[in-house]
Image: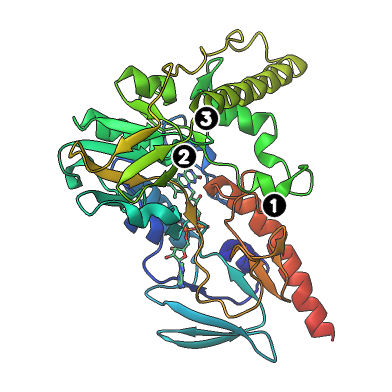
Amino acid sequence: MSHCLSERSIDHVVLERGEVANTWRNERWDSLRLLTPNWQSRLPGFGYSGDDPDGYRTVPEVIDFIANYAKAIAAPVQTRTIVSSVRRSDTGYLVHTDQGAWRCRTIVLASGACNKSSVPAFADRVPPSIATVTAQQYRNPGQLADGGVLVVGASASGTQIACEVHRSGRPVTLSVGEHIRAPRVYRGKDLQWWMDATGLLNERYDQVEDIARARRVPSLQLAGTADRSTLDLNALTGIGVKLVGRIAGITEDGRAQFAGSLRNMCALSDLKMGRLLNLIDEWAKENGFDDAVESPHRPPPTLVEKSPPLDMDLKSGELKTIIWATGYRPDYSWLDVPVLDRKGMIRHDGGVVASPGMYLMGIQFLRRRKSSLIDGAGDDARDLSAHLASYLDTLRAA
Ligand SMILES: Cc1cc2nc3c(=O)[nH]c(=O)nc-3n(C[C@H](O)[C@H](O)[C@H](O)COP(=O)(O)OP(=O)(O)OC[C@H]3O[C@@H](n4cnc5c(N)ncnc54)[C@H](O)[C@@H]3O)c2cc1C
């Protein structure tokens, strides 16, 4: 957004509570690599120029990439500045920070979609003998006690953490709710390449049937590894991870209860993956790619044991840690403008917030399916900066 505002000669400042790329410095686990290939992290005027376009960036590489971009575009970032409140004023907005106040006619909320961990309300029933960690707090297996680990959530964060923790010698049980299975490589090409080429990632918020639902869809079960392997539930059970259903509650006497829907969840996920692969095959055929890539194939169905356990005694001593990989949510506790819905999410139309001169960035399916990816920021910023510029023109004319 800063780049797009500069291109339009719109005077602006970027307020950041930490350093540039703060979330990548402080809120990711050590071994994480982007699940999007290197070629796919495209920011306006700044793409990948290395010799490994199909590789996946490590966290230090992502930090360098974003910090280098901020330098290259001379973004006017004021770091170590915590925004503590944003209010409407006569001329626009009044922004209070721990480094003084700012007045502005327009404001772009780009404070991230993943500030807090979403943890179920019954988490406070976990017996005190068990340590709990969120995916945001998890760094590496070394921070966990020896012994069993229950990872709750089987999307990108949960599956990656479950794999790493299990390989460290701590037996992992994975609690599986709704998830989206996806092969890392399909017909010889990265899944993200297909998602990009078919136009799926560019699908717009006003073209999908149920945008509220599309904004809640969990992340694809993908991981960025050197061998480009698929990290689905079959890969995890293959190394010994046990699967249980979605965690439904914890009883007062310390038993975790799991839904009996594991088979259905997995069957549904297999079905959705099949639909995605069908769509890719159709696109390949229609666009003359069939002979250029490998033949279509389907991964085997997800294997689920006949009667997965429906509960687990959290006090037996076997389980030492629970890792909540149950999703993330934004934090707008500093926003004193009445634009939140009853779930605490900002009401907006493709990033144009229901308050004059206020814009939103970086939220799932904000304007396009790719909006919450690094690769999605550019197109959204172009669109929203155009809207912002015309809003300023209107103000000037008035
Ligand atoms: C575990 C994980 C893995 C991911 N993997 C990928 C991936 O492989 N590929 C990909 O493209 N995307 C990935 N993403 C999504 C990724 O986070 C986004 O693409 C990108 O970081 C979004 O950038 P952003 O600037 O919108 O938000 P953020 O990176 O969250 O940045 C928001 C910034 O706002 C600052 N801030 C927040 N509140 C305040 C305040 N009150 N005052 C001042 N500053 C404030 C924060 O410090 C932060 O620096 C991943 C996300 C997570 C959580």
Q: Quadrant of residue 392?
A: bottom right
- The answer to whether the beta carbon of the residue marked 1 is less than 8 Å from any atom of ligand 1 is no
- Asked whether the viewer can see residue 57, the reply is no
Tell me the distance, in whole angstroms, between the alpha carbons under discs 2 and 1. 27 Å
Q: Amino acid at mark 1?
A: Arg
* Position in image of residue 259 (x %, y %): 48, 35
Vertical relation: 111 (above or below) 11? above
- Which residue: 28% across, 32% down? 172
Tell me the distance, in whole angstroms, between the alpha carbons under discs 2 and 3. 46 Å
Nearer the camera: disc 2 or disc 3: 3
* Position in image of residue 236 (x %, y %): 36, 24
Nearer the camera: disc 3 or disc 1: 3
> Which quadrant is home to the N terminus?
bottom right
Vertical relation: 10 (above or below) 181? below
- Asked whether the viewer can see residue 2, the reply is yes
Q: Amino acid at mark 2?
A: Ser
* Position in image of residue 244 (x %, y %): 40, 30
Q: Earlier in the sequence, mark 3 or mark 1?
A: 3
Q: Which residue is mark 3?
A: 261
Q: Nearer the viewer, residue 90 or 181?
A: 181
